[in-house]
């Protein structure tokens, strides 16, 4: 009886006003080649440009924002060699020794300012100088919902009064790591829950030792793992409880009438069976790199539990050009159910998506710029002023 009482009293995330956001704007300042970049996003987005234009840096910046918002941790920067290695390499003595990241999700905006640590045992971890969550364009005092300066955080209470939070985040972690009470700080809670619905794919291995080629226990698996290691189970889930008709059509279109199935042995282990008209079906160890990658992308894009935001980094890798139309068709269809960002250098894929996608073309040099956008044009974004 007690268990059911606890479940009945548990908060329903969907009841909170900030439980679901659509990402509208990304702002990055002083991260690698991104000296000052602000981009707006729509339902389906394509980021493209030549080699060295900053596509990978923008993808990594989006991943860094996700890591901060979702986990509150800044370990991703430490893995890049620390903040100093991630800062924009401008003229000596001219660069700002801090990094700023910001997002707009619907009408809610969030910004974080990261600096080089002055004290503490972890010298590679950046130090949070300030964070702000506000409503609307300008971070005016009346619009601020949560504010952090160094390690002090101020929140709005139920009476609309700004009070100091009893919780204190560490210097090297975001306030989103500790202040996630849906009742006391629904805005911070909503940001974190939103980011938990983001999925990133950029390391789908297709070599002979790829984990995607191995059989997996057959169990309900609505989400493909980032490395594709649960492909057999995730594909079986789409085939059995997802939109099998669309997936079958995509496979048939891409491979001239081919089909895919998942069988189980007597131990409940799932095995992929790809039928391309040969005398027998091929298992995952036998299919080509391009076929394996297409199966992983098809599984991602037909997930019965689509993410709120899906980010695909160079999905065309290992694919023959003949597969690009089928990939583009899958992406367009999936964008009806989730927001998608595709980072690509494939002219064929970019062109195939152009009619339905918001295209952002980057140009390189000493700093990344957006083609056709002057320095002071583009989405409206205002960084919070430094608090003293």
Image (spheres, helix red, strand yellow):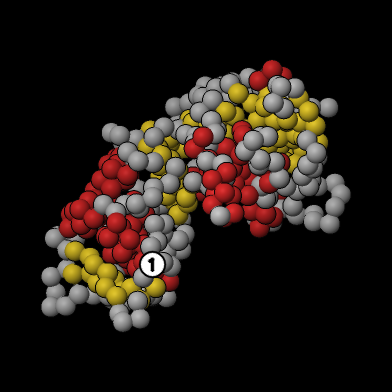
Q: Residue at x 78, y 47 (%)?
A: 170
Determine if residue 220 is in view.
yes
| Direction from residue 347 to residue 227 in the image, left or right | right
- Residue 325 in percent (x, y) is at 24, 48
Crowding near the residue tagged with mark 1, few <14, some 14–19, many ≥20 C-alpha atoms within 10 Å: some
- Residue 47 in percent (x, y) is at 43, 40
Q: Residue at x 47, y 51 (%)?
A: 200
Q: Residue at x 61, y 33 (%)?
A: 187
Task: Examine the image and state in which quarter residue 382 appears.
Answer: top right
| Direction from residue 212 to residue 193 in the image, left or right | right
Task: Examine the image and state in which quarter residue 375 appears.
Answer: top right
Question: In this view, which residue lies farthest toward the right?
Answer: 119
Question: In the picture, which quadrant includes the C terminus?
Answer: top right
Q: Secondary structure at mark 1?
A: loop
Number of dots carrying numbers: 1
Determine if residue 48 is in view.
no
| Direction from residue 240 to residue 173 in the image, left or right | right
- Residue 28 in percent (x, y) is at 60, 36
Question: In the picture, which quadrant includes the N terminus?
Answer: bottom right
Q: Is residue 39 above or below residue 74?
A: above
Q: Nearer the viewer, residue 20 or 279?
A: 20
Q: Nearer the viewer, residue 23 or 18?
A: 18
- Residue 8 in percent (x, y) is at 54, 45
Q: Nearer the viewer, residue 133 or 138?
A: 133
Question: In this view, which residue lies farthest toward the bottom?
Answer: 266
Q: Which residue is mark 1?
A: 219
Q: Is residue 303 above or below residue 53?
A: below
Q: Residue at x 22, y 51 (%)?
A: 246
């Amino acid at each position: 009886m007690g268990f059911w009482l606890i479940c009945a009293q548990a908060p329903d995330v969907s009841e909170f006003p900030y439980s679901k956001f659509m990402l509208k704007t990304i702002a990055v300042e002083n991260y690698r080649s991104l000296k000052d970049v602000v981009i707006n996003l729509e339902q389906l987005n394509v980021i493209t440009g030549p080699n060295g234009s900053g596509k990978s840096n923008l993808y990594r910046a989006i991943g860094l924002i996700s890591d901060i918002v979702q986990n509150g941790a800044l370990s991703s920067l430490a893995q890049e060699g620390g903040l100093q290695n991630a800062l924009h390499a401008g003229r000596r003595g001219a660069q700002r020794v801090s990094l700023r990241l910001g997002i707009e999700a619907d009408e809610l905006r969030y910004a974080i300012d990261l600096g080089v640590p002055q004290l503490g045992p972890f010298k590679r971890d950046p130090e949070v100088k300030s964070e702000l969550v506000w409503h609307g364009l300008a971070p005016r005092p009346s619009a601020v919902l949560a504010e952090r300066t160094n390690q002090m955080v101020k929140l709005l209470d139920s009476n609309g009064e700004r009070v100091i939070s009893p919780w204190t985040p560490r210097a090297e972690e975001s306030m989103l790591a500790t202040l996630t009470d849906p009742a006391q700080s629904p805005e911070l809670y909503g940001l974190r829950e939103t980011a938990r619905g983001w999925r990133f794919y950029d390391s789908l291995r297709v070599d002979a030792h790829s984990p995607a080629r191995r059989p997996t226990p057959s169990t309900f698996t609505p989400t493909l793992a980032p490395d594709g290691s649960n492909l057999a189970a995730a594909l079986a889930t789409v085939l059995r409880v997802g939109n099998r008709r669309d997936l079958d059509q995509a496979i048939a279109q891409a491979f001239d009438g081919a089909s895919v199935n998942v069988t189980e042995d007597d131990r409940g282990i799932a095995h992929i069976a790809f039928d391309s008209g040969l005398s027998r079906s091929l298992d995952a160890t036998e299919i080509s790199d391009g076929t394996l990658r297409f199966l992983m992308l098809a599984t991602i894009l037909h997930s019965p539990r689509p993410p709120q935001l899906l980010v695909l980094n160079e999905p065309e890798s290992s694919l023959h050009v003949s597969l690009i139309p089928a990939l583009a068709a899958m992406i367009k269809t999936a964008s009806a159910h989730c927001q998608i960002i595709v980072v690509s250098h494939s002219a064929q894929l970019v062109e195939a998506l152009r009619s339905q996608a918001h295209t952002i073309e980057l140009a390189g040099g000493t700093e990344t710029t957006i083609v056709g956008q002057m320095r002071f044009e583009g989405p409206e974004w205002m960084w919070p002023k430094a608090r003293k």
